[in-house]
């Protein structure tokens, strides 16, 4: 079980994933050595990692897709494991409700989408049917989800080391930046010294490159911890059908909801996909019956409840932690 100080540290890293140990210590009013030991322990226990969330257009041509998979009886586990190994699969989970397996996939090139969706995924043993939705726009992503534990004063201390992205042109990413993207994707807290050694650059050049990459929003550092470790034991992917004139308004409201980890406007039979986390069934019931009720234009919804998470943001999971061979 995570302790209260563990949760405070995670909350601080959610605000400033690259904050120095000294800044984290100042915000949490503990010693730097305590922060260092606590962070190291969480990493060693395979509970926490700080990664780099790469902007879609810097990773591939085209947007991600949501994919719902129906399997033959008794085949959901083996099919989910096989699908999780596809390199294009960013997220894979066994689910109950709308589908047996839910996937989030990002294909490097639009031309490859047909092969993946029409041939490779349906060709996995045990897969009986599939349905996909193309993401048109994301209103919030996992890097924006927060534990609300820290005071305004603590947040101000951490904000000193926040980098606010100002946008970028995906066609203007140089070769050194592309190599750096790979390093930051695996370790969002990599130092300029470490990056310089890996890239064969001076520390000062690596520092400028890191700051430019972060400032342009090519990579957004984020904390990866399974929601269940933080007390959010119920996760669901909710597909909503909404009248066209209300799609933007509903999506915007859902993006501001405290449960929202990923909200996107999609093209398909649904209009908006809400990937949310809840502490328990009562909290999810309140969301479905109370919070959604006043929103205009919702005509239908379908819910897939996550039973087991196998892969999230290309990192394999095992019993709520990172799989041993992928730490």
Image (cartoon, helix red, strand yellow):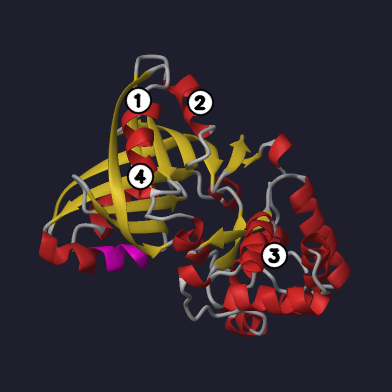
Q: CA distance from mark 4 to mark 1?
A: 17 Å
Q: Which residue is mark 2?
A: 82
Mark closer to the chain start, 4 or 2: 2
Residue at image point 37% right, 55% down: 62
Residue 213 location, quadrant: bottom right
Q: Position of residue 186 (x, y in %)?
A: 67, 54
Q: Which residue is mark 1?
A: 122
Mark closer to the chain start, 4 or 1: 4
Q: Position of residue 304 (x, y in %)?
A: 34, 38
Q: Is residue 301 above or below residue 211?
A: above
> Residues in magenta?
251-257
The disc at residue 9 is 3
Residue 217 is at least partly visible in this image:
yes
**Which element is circle 1 on?**
loop
Nearer mark to the viewer, of 2 and 3: 2
Mark closer to the chain start, 3 or 1: 3
Residue 185 in the figure: left or right of residue 97: right
- Crowd band around label 2 with a 10 angstrom C-alpha radius: few (<14), some (14–19), many (20+): some
**Which element is circle 4 on?**
helix
Q: Which residue is mark 4?
A: 111
Mark closer to the chain start, 2 or 3: 3
């Amino acid at each position: 079980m995570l302790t209260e100080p563990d949760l405070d540290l995670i909350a601080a890293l959610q605000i400033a994933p690259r904050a120095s140990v000294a800044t984290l210590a100042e915000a949490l009013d503990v010693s730097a050595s305590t922060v260092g030991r606590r962070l190291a322990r969480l990493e060693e226990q395979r509970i926490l990692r700080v990664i780099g969330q790469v902007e879609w257009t810097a990773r591939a041509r085209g947007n991600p897709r949501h994919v719902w998979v129906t399997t033959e009886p008794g085949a959901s586990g083996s099919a989910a494991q096989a699908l999780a190994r596809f390199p294009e699969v960013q997220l894979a989970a066994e689910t109950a409700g709308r589908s047996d397996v839910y996937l989030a996939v990002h294909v490097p090139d639009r031309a490859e989408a047909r092969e993946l969706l029409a041939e490779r995924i349906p060709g996995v043993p045990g897969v009986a049917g599939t349905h996909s939705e193309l993401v048109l726009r994301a209103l919030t992503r996992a890097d924006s989800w927060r534990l609300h534990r820290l005071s305004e004063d603590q947040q101000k201390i951490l904000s000193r080391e926040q980098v606010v992205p100002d946008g970028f042109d995906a066609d203007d990413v140089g070769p050194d930046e592309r190599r750096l993207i790979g390093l930051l994707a695996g370790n969002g807290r990599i130092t300029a010294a470490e990056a310089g050694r890996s890239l064969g650059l001076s520390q000062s050049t690596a520092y400028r490159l890191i700051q430019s990459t972060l400032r342009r929003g090519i990579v957004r550092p984020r904390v990866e911890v399974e929601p269940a470790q933080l007390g959010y034991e119920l996760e669901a992917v909710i597909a909503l059908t909404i009248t066209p004139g209300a799609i933007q308004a509903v999506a915007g409201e859902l993006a501001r909801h405290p449960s929202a980890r990923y909200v996107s406007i999609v093209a398909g039979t649904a209009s908006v996909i809400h990937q949310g986390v809840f502490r328990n069934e009562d909290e999810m019931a309140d969301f479905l019956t109370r919070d959604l009720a006043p929103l205009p234009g919702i005509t239908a919804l379908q819910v897939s409840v996550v039973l087991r998470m196998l892969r999230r943001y290309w990192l394999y999971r095992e019993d709520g932690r990172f799989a041993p061979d992928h730490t």
